[in-house]
Image (cartoon, rainbow, N blue to C red):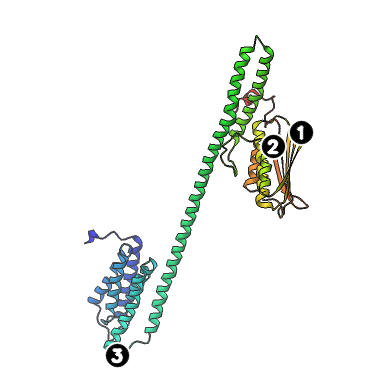
Amino acid sequence: MAALLPRPTRADAGLTAILLLLAVGSTCAITVFGPVATDRDPWPWGYALILVATVPVLWCTAFPRASAVVVVVAASVYYPLAFPDGMVMLNAAVMLYTLVRHGHRVLGWSLGIGQFAALNLYEFAFFGTVRPEALGIIAWVLVLLCSAEILRWRGEYQKAERERAAEAGRTREEELLRRASDERLRLARDVHDTVAHNISLIHVQAGTALYLMESEPERAAQALSTIKRTSKDTLSELRGILGVLRAVDEAAPRSPVPGVERLSELVEGTRGAGVEVTLETAGTPQHLPVSTGTAAYRTVQEALTNVVRHSGAAHARVRIAYGASALDIEVTDDGHGTVGPAAHGNGITGMAERAAMVGGSVDAGPLDGGGFRVRARLPLDGGERPAAVSADESRSP
């Protein structure tokens, strides 16, 4: 039989030892130091019932229902047999609490109320009276069972909170993985649409230059000039792609990388959203590296997106100024602006990161008279380092 029972846990063994010590010790103390004339000698049957009402506690974790039934019945039988009124009933209280605390509510409440009713019915049937302390006992039973219910509810609530926290962690991890996958797709398309195209162009122009080197040196020189400009753009774009850590609020592109030449399309799309947008250009338009053009387009795109989504503005102004060494971008609106300094969320952070890739900067904040302004300054060389660098530095990625 012992081989069929699981090994008791340390907690169950410790609890059993404590209950056995209290039950046997209290019974012995009453028998030796305060005997009652009507009490029966607990040896041997009284102590045998105490063992029956205590030993099943060893398996209260493995078999809570069966252990509780045996303990409660044995403890209930002990008292009508007129043995010394020790602490055997504490065993029944512990098992009733354990039942309700671990979700066996119906059996726990049934045993608790049933034990109280059975003992009082027995006294009334055989003695014609019920002890006055019966009401106090039922109150303690209710307090015990209700305390177990409260702790059970608290345990279930804490478990649900832990599960929600774990699910939130899994959701954040999945979102990070999804964004990483989107970023890899975006970079792959950037490479295909810009770098691969430029390398193919360099290959064709190099072949042309070799072919015309002796017969038409002027055309060969033009081809070499094209190779120089294209290779510069390609290197700038490669530095931008390698520096990208993440893309903010962008979907994977399905067309060639946009630049300043597509700002008019962006402005028209914003007008369709209900905001009147004015596009102004100052200075002489120049050829921009792909990375700089893309950074300019994305900056204006994010700024106009914030205007539509958050500002409540009726009018916005986009100003593009070509300077001697930098492209200045300014997007303002007449919306409600912000209270205090601007909170740098994902959008503003993304603009700043993209500008930093090409050696530029972004400044965003509310205007004094109301509205909001985003300013960006992007170097026209696409963040290219000066030519006077050391040989070791030029070989670094």
Q: Nearer the viewer, mark 1 or mark 2?
A: 1
In depth, the one of 175 and 230 nearer the eye is 230
**In the rendered image, which quarter contains the N terminus?**
bottom left
The disc label shown at residue 128, or none: 3
Question: Residue 300 placed where, x, y %?
Answer: 68, 42
Q: Please give the residue where the numbered disc 1 appears in the rendered image.
A: 323
* Amino acid type at mark 1: Gly
Q: Classify 22 as above or below 335.
A: below
In depth, the one of 262 and 66 nearer the eye is 262
SS at circle 1: loop
Question: Residue 283 placed where, x, y %?
Answer: 77, 34
Which residue is pictured at 61% across the width and 18% down the height? 206
The disc label shown at residue 360, or none: 2
Q: Does the residue at mark 1 contact the one at mark 2 (Cβ under 8 Å)?
A: no
**In the rendered image, which quarter contains the C terminus?**
top right
* Amino acid type at mark 2: Gly
Task: Looking at the image, tell me whether mark 3 or mark 1 is earlier in sequence order.
Answer: 3
List the single residue furthest toward the bottom.
128
Residue 355 in view here: no
